[in-house]
């Protein structure tokens, strides 16, 4: 009798397991990806968003898998972003891509995603390592901020070595610079500032900081700061080092208003307006991440997670979690890239 | 000491508690009202959502308020009618409860609707198409809009100015078609000569200006047919200040952030704008009302406004131009 019951139970178990297996093997024909952006009006983020949309269409056409993107703007509010993530989960998104508002506050979103077993691909703003280590289905795609900053510094070093008078405008042997910084809470802001200056010093460019300020990645704030500095330090500023292109463009606006044309301005991101400014000679150069690869990595990784596939080989993950997008220096001759 | 009877009572009481717990947890006693989430697919005529940012805000707002799940879909190629029909069918097959469509080709869509290929409630955007199969439509009078814009332009431009219409090389959207008709009718009515320059992917503002200058005119007024061309023209003018010396006006339609920015900076003289946030919001409302069996279907005509730089900060236009979700 006992043997019989045991056999029956075993048969039921086998049946249940095989049912589950069949469900898993069923091929998905559509995937849904929820994307929450920290701020939709950020030029760089907007560029990435457009690229992701294009890549989703490409993916759909190539693989015959319908890709639905739910893109939401958190407008700089972590609370709004938390609600958006919750809504993505309740709408049945297969995977969520988050450009966090506050990188220190990712744990709430991670908890919700873990409970619902929905993988999360973070991008552009890197959550703290402690959070990223909480689950194996958490990923981060971004650029190596240190590499960005070194390339930014290198741009000036190369120019100084080739033609010192183009950087040291008054020929006094010192390059006087001002610094425009992004948000103080953003990891890239701190690293970009530190390594950009260190790279200039290592390259033996004789630099001296006049002043600096936080413009929160924003063009208008940078423009206002620059305007103020031009009044405070007339005929002194030779170089503007900016943590991103938007702030560099703000500084250029202020310089144009003051009818100053010879100050060198360098940015980071390679946004569309940034590249245009390089092309027109208004900006000395920028460091551009390859946005096509950036967006592709986000989409391919998200799609892979949604379909339960292995991570794509084209985008090798460091420690199984991080993918660093390649970047390059863009100066006048290659601004058409 | 508990007696046999007491033990039995305690046992029954425990059983009662367990049953009560099970009934509560399985919604047998307290049943929470089930709110259905309606699946709505919005399929536009364009390959990008650049001109739909305020529309999307309204759409998202309505989706949250009415608990709808709205999917916004752009085409692979702009103004491809077959692709749009294909996407409509796909969404219907994937379980969309209602559709909101900005038709590329009204006739093709009407055929699909009348042949019962499309069976879910459908709301149309920017189209005057009517029929049993269509539960509602939201549009603006684009022909009148074209007339209004042209009459404003004629009022302001110098008499010796040359009028240039920058037009789409490819097929126009339904709204674009009506808008152009309004422009040309108004120009004809006023006996104003014009030349049309067709733009390819990159607008050839320089070439068009050169052409106009070659014809001996010192002043040029530019009328643009679509928000994309208006944005690109303003961008080209902003990039090269020499253009603005001979251009005495750039006019068009649309109220995207870029257009409003150029208007504020003085590179666009005037634009006609519609409450796109409202269009997005009401289109979702119409679809949900129909799905709930309430009366929601009707033809809604949205007002348009002619806006110039000084109007940007007027309170009356704030909600239309800068909607807050």
Image (cartoon, helix red, strand yellow):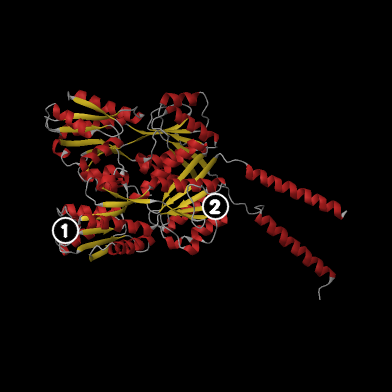
Total marks placed: 2
Residue B131: quarter of image = top left
The chain identifier of the residue carrying mark 1 reads: A
Q: Is A173 in front, or is A286?
A: A173
Q: Is B310 in front, or is A200?
A: A200
The chain identifier of the residue carrying mark 2 reads: A
How crowded is the residue under tag 2: few (<14 C-alpha within 10 Å), some, or many (20+)?
many
Between the C-alphas of marks 1 and 2, the distance is: 55 Å
Quadrant location, the C terminus of chain A: top left
Question: Residue A9, position in %: x, y?
Answer: 79, 51
Q: Residue furthest front?
A: A162
Residue A169, label in figure = 1
Q: Is A324 in front, or is B104?
A: A324
Q: Which residue is mark 2?
A: A118
Above or below residue A214? Residue B305 is above
Q: Is residue B67 visible?
A: no
Judge depth for marks 1 and 2 and give the one in front: 1
Left or right of A205 on screen, residue A169: left
Mark 2 lies on a secondary structure that is loop
Q: Residue at x 29, y 42 (%)?
A: A336
Question: Residue A107, position in %: x, y?
Answer: 49, 61
Mark 1 lies on a secondary structure that is loop
Q: Residue at x 31, y 55 (%)?
A: A244
Above or below residue A163? Residue B123 is above
How crowded is the residue under tag 1: few (<14 C-alpha within 10 Å), some, or many (20+)?
some
Residue A236, label in figure = none
Question: Residue B302, position in %: x, y?
Answer: 34, 36
Question: Residue A73, position in %: x, y?
Answer: 40, 50
């Amino acid at each position: 009798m006992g043997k019989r019951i045991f056999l029956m139970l075993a048969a039921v178990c086998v049946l249940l397991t095989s049912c589950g297996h069949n469900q898993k093997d069923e091929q998905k024909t559509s995937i849904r990806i929820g994307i929450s952006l920290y701020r939709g009006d950020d030029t760089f983020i907007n560029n990435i968003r457009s690229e992701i949309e294009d890549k989703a269409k490409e993916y759909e056409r190539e693989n015959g898998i319908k890709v639905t993107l739910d893109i939401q703007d958190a407008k700089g509010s972590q609370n709004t972003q938390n609600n958006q993530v919750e809504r993505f989960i309740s709408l049945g998104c297969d995977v969520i891509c988050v450009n966090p508002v506050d990188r220190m506050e990712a744990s709430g979103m991670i908890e919700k995603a873990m409970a619902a077993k929905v993988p999360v691909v973070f991008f552009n703003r890197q959550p703290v390592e402690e959070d990223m280590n909480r689950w194996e289905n958490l990923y981060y795609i971004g650029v190596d901020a240190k590499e960005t900053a070194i390339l930014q510094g290198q741009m000036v070093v190369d120019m100084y070595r080739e033609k010192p008078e183009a950087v040291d405008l008054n020929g006094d042997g010192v390059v006087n610079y001002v610094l425009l910084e992004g948000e103080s809470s953003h990891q890239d802001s701190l690293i970009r500032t530190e390594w950009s200056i260190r790279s200039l010093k290592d390259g033996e460019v004789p630099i001296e900081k006049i002043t600096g300020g936080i413009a929160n990645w924003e063009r208008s704030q940078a423009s206002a700061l620059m305007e103020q500095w031009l009044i405070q330090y007339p005929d002194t500023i030779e170089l503007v080092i900016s943590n991103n292109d938007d702030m560099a463009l703000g500084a250029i606006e202020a310089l144009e208003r003051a009818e100053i044309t010879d100050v060198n301005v360098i940015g980071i991101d390679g946004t569309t307006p940034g590249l245009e400014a390089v092309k027109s000679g208004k900006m000395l150069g920028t460091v551009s991440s390859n946005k096509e690869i950036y967006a592709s990595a986000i989409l391919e990784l998200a799609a892979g997670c949604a379909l339960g596939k292995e991570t794509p080989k084209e985008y090798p993950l460091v420690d199984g979690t991080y993918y660093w997008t390649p970047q390059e220096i863009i100066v006048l001759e290659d601004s058409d890239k | 000491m508990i007696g046999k009877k007491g033990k039995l009572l305690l046992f029954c009481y425990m059983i009662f508690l367990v049953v009560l717990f099970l009934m509560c947890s399985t919604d047998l006693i307290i049943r929470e009202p089930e709110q259905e989430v309606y699946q709505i697919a919005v399929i536009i005529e364009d390959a990008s959502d650049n001109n739909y940012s305020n529309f999307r805000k309204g759409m998202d707002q309505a989706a949250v308020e009415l608990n709808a799940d709205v999917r916004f879909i752009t085409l692979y190629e702009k103004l491809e009618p077959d692709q749009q029909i294909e996407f409509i069918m796909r969404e219907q097959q994937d379980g969309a409860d209602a559709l909101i469509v900005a038709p590329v080709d009204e006739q093709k869509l009407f055929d699909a609707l009348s042949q019962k290929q499309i069976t879910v409630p459908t709301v149309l955007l920017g189209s005057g198409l009517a029929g049993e199969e269509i539960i509602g439509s939201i549009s603006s009078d684009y022909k009148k809009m074209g007339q209004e814009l042209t009459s404003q332009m004629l009022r302001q431009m110098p008499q010796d100015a040359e009028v240039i219409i920058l037009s789409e090389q490819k097929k126009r959207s339904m709204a674009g078609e009506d808008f152009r008709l309004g422009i040309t009718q108004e120009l004809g009515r006023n006996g104003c000569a014009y030349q049309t320059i067709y733009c390819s992917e990159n607008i050839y503002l320089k070439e068009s200006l050169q052409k106009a200058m070659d014809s001996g005119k010192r002043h040029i007024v530019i009328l643009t047919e679509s928000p994309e061309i208006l944005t690109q023209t303003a961008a080209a003018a902003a990039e090269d200040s020499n253009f603005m010396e001979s251009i005495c006006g750039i006019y068009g339609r649309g109220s995207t952030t870029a257009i409003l920015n150029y208007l504020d900076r003085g590179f666009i003289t005037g634009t006609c704008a519609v409450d796109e946030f409202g269009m997005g919001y009401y289109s979702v409302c119409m679809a949900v009302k129909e799905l709930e069996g309430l009366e929601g279907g009707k033809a809604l005509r949205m007002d348009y406004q002619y806006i110039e730089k000084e109007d940007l900060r007027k309170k009356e236009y704030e909600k239309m131009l800068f909607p807050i979700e």
